[in-house]
Structure formats: C-alpha cells, structure tokens
Image (tube, rainbow, N blue to C red):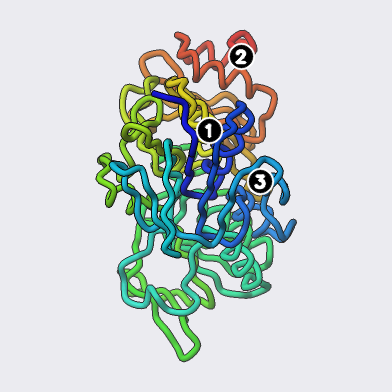
Amino acid sequence: MPEPERIIIVGTGLAGATAAAEVRERGFRGEVTLFGEQSHRPYELPALSKSVLLGETDEPEWVHDQGFYAEHDIDLRTSVRVERVDPAQQLVTDDRGGTHRYDRLVLATGSRPRHVAVPGADLPGVRTLRTLDDALALRAAFGEGVRVVVVGAGWIGTEAAAAARTHGADVTVVEQAELPLLPVLGAEVAAVFRDLHTEHGVKWRLGTAIAEFTADAGGVRGVRLRDGQELAADLVLVAVGAGPRVELAEAAGLDLAADGGVAVDEGLAAAPGVFAAGDIASHSHPRYGHRVRVEHWANAKDQGAHVARNLLGENEPYLATPYFFTDQYDLGCEYRGLADPAADELVVRGDLSSREFIAFWLREGRVRAALNVNSWDEGDALQALVDSRAAVSARQLLEEDLGRFE
C-alpha cells in the first residue's frame, strides 16, 4: 500500500484526536483533516461524570492545548458533520456541501446515549450525559433537596448518583438487575457498590423497570415503575448505556458486527484504506479469540495511537487489554481485562467490607481480569497477570507476592 498523502479522520473524540496527533508524531507530512460535530475542541470524557459533575472543575481534560492543531498542521473542523463516505471513490461529503478526497480514512464517531422507549421519554427534565454541555447542565440542576431519579446503575449511573448526592440531592436509582454493575462485577463485588451508595443516602429500586415518565406543566414530575409505584422527580437521568454511532459506516457498505460495531480486523481495518477506532470498533482481538468492543477511555486513546501507525503502513495487530477506572465517594478502583463473572472463579485478596481489596476472575487457571479497589501498589503486577495469562492458582493470588508477575 503506497504512502498516503491525505488522511481524513471523522470524529473529534479521544480516538480521533489521538490518531491525528500520532501520525504527526511519526513524521507524516501530508494533509490531516479532523472533522467533528461538536463546537468544542477534542476532550476526554471521564471527567464529565466525575470532576465536572462534582463541581471540581468547569472543564474536561482537553486532549491537546488550544493551539496544538494549528501548530501541527492538523485541519481541525469543529461543528461540521460528515454526511457521506464513499470508499470506492475515497471521498467524504460534509453537511456544508464540501467533498474531500482521502487516501486513508479513520472512522472514530463514538457513541450516543441510549434512550428508553416509554411514554414521556422526551419530556423536559429527562436527560442523558455524554457531552461537556450535558455535564454542566446536570451539575447546575443538582442541588440540596432536588429529587433526582437515575435510570440505570452502570458506571455512568453510579458515578452520577454519587455526584448528585455530593451536591445534596435526594437520589433514587432504578435498575432492572438485582444489583448495580452486576454484569461486569458479579454479585459479590457489585454488592460493595450497592452498600457504598446506600451508606451515602442513595435509595435503590432494584429488579424493576420503568413504565413511564409522568409530567406536569413544567416537564417531568415523576417516574412510574412497572409495579405501579411512582417516584417523585424534579430531574431524571437516563443512564442505560450507549450505542455506537455507525450510520456513516453502514451507509458506506462497511460490515457491522453482532455487537453493533463496525467489524474491523486485528489491525483495526474495516476495508482497504478504511479504519475504525474507539467505541465503534468491533475488534477481532487476538488475545481473546473473538470480537471485542469497548467504550472506555483507555481503549479510545490506545486504539487512536495504534490506528495511526497502521495508517502509515505498519499493519500491526492491536493487542491491548481493556482498562477502566472509577471514583465514587471515597472509593477508587481500576479494572484490567475482560471477565465473565457468571462463569469465572472470583478470588478476593483483602476484605470486601473494608473496601480495600483486589478481586481476580480466574478461568482455567489464568487471570481473565483484576479489579483493585482503594489499593494502588500492585497495578503493574495486575497488568502483567492479565496480559501474560500466566498460570496461577487461587492460593498463589491470595498468599504470594504479586510483584513477581511484573
């Protein structure tokens, strides 16, 4: 494949902005154009549900300084939507009527919040959290005694609930599963998060679903559950996950995977000269032997850097294991790997009740994932355990020095 002259990246999130910077870092001297629908320059998402929502800052972590893009000859086009991709002609068309030719294309269009298909879902006061503007508006609405109902108890839902309680809001979380974060952590570890929030005054409605949002003249006034109970609400945050934004890819004829993402190979290629990275990439992962699609910060950053190398001809497989982190009240944790809590063996080093422990998920004598909670000294060893798939027993994880795995 000849050296490209023109690279177009669609999406100004972390994956897209990282890819643009990395091709320059690696000496690429051709054209780099970065299209994004938001008016802001590229920023990272984790702070939105953490420090921004808590009121610790008014800004997210910007991917690069204000002048970075001009200084590195990256044509950053904000508030511009790409409407069409034509892989056969190697063209993209924007919403202003412009057409742009590329030699290599990266789709990094990210995700959008999922909604709930119940009456009242479009009422004023029913909100989602995805952008900086969303976070600032939510924070302004949180306050002492404000009745907040959070629908969904995943990572965004639980982080937002913690922020709302920190602002003094009256918070109820509604979740169809029997525990928050149950599919990711399993019952024993998920109970730690339930109890943490309960101690901070969050009320739970677990194992149930919503039937409708009710209204008064000003907008949403409550959430009616399927059992008929109605929860009073001044504000509702719908946090039931996100869906990949794959409309451009699908219209361009690219293959979609069963998980809804764009099907990419081991090197993140979706078609000749076309790559996908970040939330939308359903990656044929060599480490796991199946497709993996991850919507976390580290995946966007790492895939953005990796796809840049392959844009320039390296054609190397992407091997990184998933990673994410959360901070809720006085609990901080990091998760590495990809476990199936319903099938894997849980091994806990430390004390769940103290909220200072390491949880391992074992399958066939190898660590599939590790979670360190308020325990910060073993990060490198945990990464090595997950990455190397070294043979290890539950007894060794409980008793031996984890540093030997670094």
Tell me the SS state at disc 1: strand
The disc placed on residue 69 is 3
Say which of 108 and 84 sits in front.
84
Q: Where residue 297 appears, x then y in whole percent? A: 55, 41
The disc placed on residue 190 is none
Residue mark closest to the camera, 2 vs 1: 1
State the separation of the CA atoms marked 2 and 1: 19 Å
Residue type highlighted by circle 3: Tyr
Question: Is disc 2 surrounded by few (<14), some (14 to 19) or many (20+) residues within 10 Å?
Answer: some
Residue mark closest to the camera, 3 vs 2: 3
Above or below, 260 against 96 in this view is: above
Q: Where residue 263 appears, x then y in whole percent? A: 31, 36
Could you tell me if the residues under marks 2 and 1 are in contact, i.e. CB atoms within 8 Å? no
Q: Which residue occupies 40% across, 26% down? A: 267
Q: Which residue occupies 46% across, 48% down? A: 10
State the separation of the CA atoms marked 1 and 3: 28 Å
Q: Which residue occupies 37% across, 37% down? A: 274
Pick out the residue farthest to the bottom: 217
State the separation of the CA atoms marked 3 and 2: 42 Å
Question: Is disc 3 surrounded by few (<14), some (14 to 19) or many (20+) residues within 10 Å?
Answer: some
Tell me the SS state at disc 3: helix
Q: Can residue 31 be seen in this view?
A: yes
Question: Is disc 1 surrounded by few (<14), some (14 to 19) or many (20+) residues within 10 Å?
Answer: many
Q: Quadrant of residue 210?
A: bottom left
Residue to which mark 2 is pinned: 402
Quarter in which the N terminus is drawn: top left
Give the mark nearest the N terminus, 2 or 1: 1
Residue mark closest to the camera, 1 vs 3: 3
Say which of 234 and 383 sits in front.
383
Above or below, 275 against 154 in this view is: above
Residue to which mark 1 is pinned: 323
Q: Is residue 190 visible?
A: no
